[in-house]
Amino acid sequence: MLICGGAGFIGSHVARRFVANGAHVTVIDALVAGTGGSLDHIADVQPVVDLFVAPIESIDGLRALLDSVDVIVDAMAWTRHLAALQDPLLDMRLNLAAHLTLIQALRGLRPRLVIYLGSRSQYGRTAARVVTEDEPMAPSDPQGVHKVAAESHFRNYAALDGYHVVSLRLPNCYGECQPVTGDDIGLVGGFIRTLCEDQTVTVYGKTRRRTLLYARDAAEVVARVAELSVSGFIALNVAGRDVEIRDLAMQLRSLVGRGSVADGVMPSEIAAIDQGDATVDDSRLRALIGDVPQTDLHDALRRTVGYFTEHLA
């Protein structure tokens, strides 16, 4: 088992999940500043994983390493949407070029399973009320554009070279190991940090909704997908939990115990990339792995608040 980006937010949860299952895990992570990668995230399992701290394009013997594993999880990512608007070239390097390096290194090797962690942002803002995997993708920001491009390369090269790819289109993820500093750290993370600083969380619209996925649940989905017998390329939505954003803010206010929640007008730069309130259909995923795991929302938020409280202290 190889996890590219295995010291990052979601990748570290995936690494721990497979180690707990007795798998031999190798992690590649460049620990690029601003991506959220940190060896602290895998400190508890680092003694039993093989670790490469380097950009994937700099690893000697990459093809031999890839050829030695049966499952590869591509969790490399930069998830700061607003920052990507200001630096789309950096987003291209992290959300596209790094994945092309992996794809090219796989060429000519024996077939294996690659699980690519895609994004709900690939669809952009859609007129559909329910988004299936067949919905046309029209991303509204650089990250979504590059995620679509990376997934498209996986689709094409899977057909050309005979390996197997599952692209998991994930919604907003939250949980332990997510970034706590810097700008644009995600909906849940941004709310928690603002409240921990005893500031006001501003909610744009009283009925706006989002789908959320707890990081440990994301790792469990990856683990179940890794057990599938897949041929060629398949894209699968992961729906997550549908929540009203104002209710989420109020729950977090109660858990943090300080700060406040107020209503406001959405800034234009956020409105330009807002994905709307469409729900996601993950029936294809459920048909393959059964019920998608969902940790109790209050418990998952409580753990996340605890992580932020510890790391912001």
Image (cartoon, rainbow, N blue to C red):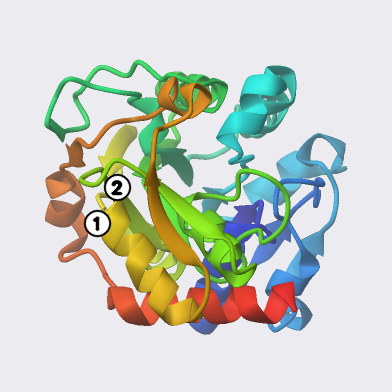
Residue type at numbered disc 2: Arg
Q: Quadrant of the C terminus?
A: bottom right
Mark closer to the chain start, 1 or 2: 2
Q: Is mark 2 on a helix, strand or loop?
A: strand
Q: Residue at x 85, y 48 (%)?
A: 54
Rounded to the nearest angstrom, the CA distance separating label 1 from label 2 is: 6 Å
297 or 100, nearer to the observer: 297
Q: Which residue is drawn at 69% across and 71% down?
A: 41
User: Residue 215: percent from the left, percent from the top?
Assistant: 46, 64
Q: Name the residue under label 2.
A: 210
Q: Quadrant of the N terminus?
A: bottom right
Q: Which residue is drawn at 47% across and 44% down?
A: 117
User: Residue 224: percent from the left, percent from the top?
Assistant: 33, 64
**Mark 1 and mark 2 residues within 8 Å of each other at the beta carbon:** yes
Q: Mark 1 points at which residue?
A: 243
User: Residue 146: percent from the left, percent from the top?
Assistant: 54, 22
From the viewer's perspective, tell me whether residue 274 is left or right of residue 92. left
Residue type at numbered disc 1: Val
